Image (cartoon, rainbow, N blue to C red):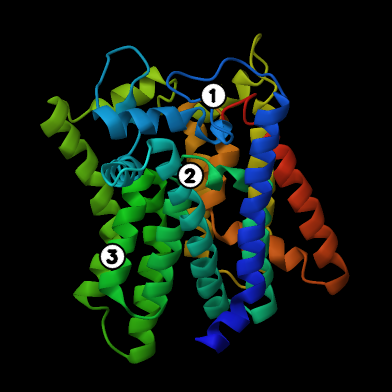
Amino acid sequence: MTAWLRERRAILAVAIGSRVLVLAAAAADHWLHWPGGPPPPHGASTSHTLSILSYWDGAWYRTVADQGYLLIPGRQSDPAFFPLFPIVLRGLNGLGLSFLTSGLLVANVAFVVGIVAFYEVSRRLLPLDVARMSAMLAALFPMSFVFSMTYPESLVFAALALALVFALDGRWTLSAIAGAAAALGRPEAIFFALPLVAIAIGRARASGRVAGGRAIGAAFAPVASVATFPLYLGWALDNVSAWSHAQRAWGRAFSLDGIVHAFQQLHEPGSTPWLWRDVAFCLIYLGLLAAARRVGISGPWLVASAALVLLPLASGTFLSDARFGLLALPVYWGAAALARRRVVRLPVLVVSAALLVAGTMTIPLVNP
């Protein structure tokens, strides 16, 4: 255990330190009342020192945890939000913790676990120096303040990383459980069925045997898990299409020409300039995926990650694509490959940390 911790000490220090930076920046936002921003969304606390970390979608997840799902036709409503995070919040609230405290605790602890699990995935696929740097860059990535918000991203990040490391080690039952949990947090987790299938096939070829039922089951566990959500909504709300109806009310109706509408939206009168941040990160993610390919990351990983970044554009907007791309794990491998030279590493980490603090300070202004 001591040797295990010693090898991961720097990664744990950066992961925990990055969360300290985010929490300190959020507290500074509260104390300084800067930037002003619009009024917080419905149900969001403004009195807590870390209030801004519960803004935006965090208020909706709390509503689901507190009251369950309710579809309001034609209006923004909560069936658009997947159930893993509200289930966890509800459970901790039953133990006496407030929803805000529960959300912050889960988000930050899950992220640290996720960074360690991501490092374990990385070191099985890449040279040790790249694996270590990729974990540090994931912790300090400019948009990673989202992982400290009362959003499901940190839980999904951890579950995805665990599903992948378990698969790489041939522990298929645990991989299936983790993959299913990830997909109940964010539906985009289904894309990682591709690398899971590739891992199952690769291990089968290495052993000279056909991939077993448990391996294939683990690979498709995220897909099966996503399919259970509309079935639950059909039982609870008498409407198996409640999720898609709610998505349309939120302005996310998927269509063949959705990407065209996403670009048109950038030039519409009244569109927020913050959309350009999402455009910039979309391009950054794609560039980093190209860099990941150069260090030997295979097609299934890259296709899954590119789909995760690009498919949301089919809903007609770039909005929040900077957040969605955080779960494209090979992005961090590409970033680490570009920062592999010793002279580059420290400046990249310092600049990333500064941008992380700046990003945290923007939370009151725009939904990440």
Report the residue at 17% width, 38% height from top. Answer: 232
- Residue most toward the top? 269
Q: CA distance from mark 1 to mark 2?
A: 15 Å
When asked about the image quadrant of residue 175, the answer is bottom left
236 with respect to 60 (left or right): left
Q: Quadrant of residue 238?
A: top left
Nearer-N-terminus badge (3/1) = 1
- Residue 46: assigned label: 1
Q: Which residue is mark 3?
A: 176
Q: Which residue is mark 2?
A: 104
Q: Are marks 3 and 1 in contact (CB under 8 Å)?
A: no
User: With respect to residue 268, does 1 lie above or below?
Assistant: below
Disc 1 + disc 2, Cβ < 8 Å:
no
Residue 242: which quarter of the image?
A: top left
- Please give the name of the residue rendered at 51% of the width and 52% of the height, measured from the top-left corner: 108
Give the CA distance from mark 3 to mark 1: 39 Å
Secondary structure, mark 2, is: helix
How many residues crowd mark 1 within 10 Å: few (<14), some (14–19), many (20+)?
A: some
Give the percent coordinates (x, y) of residue 338.
Answer: 76, 64
Residue at image coords 62%, 44%? 23
Q: Disc 3 or disc 2, which is closer to the eye?
A: 2
Drawn side of residue 325 relative to residue 98, left or right: right
Report x, y in % for residue 119.
56, 71
- Disc 2 marks a residue whose amino acid type is Leu
Instruction: Estimate the x, y position of residue 167 in percent, counting from the top left.
Output: 37, 73
Q: Residue at x 67, y 26 (%)?
A: 274
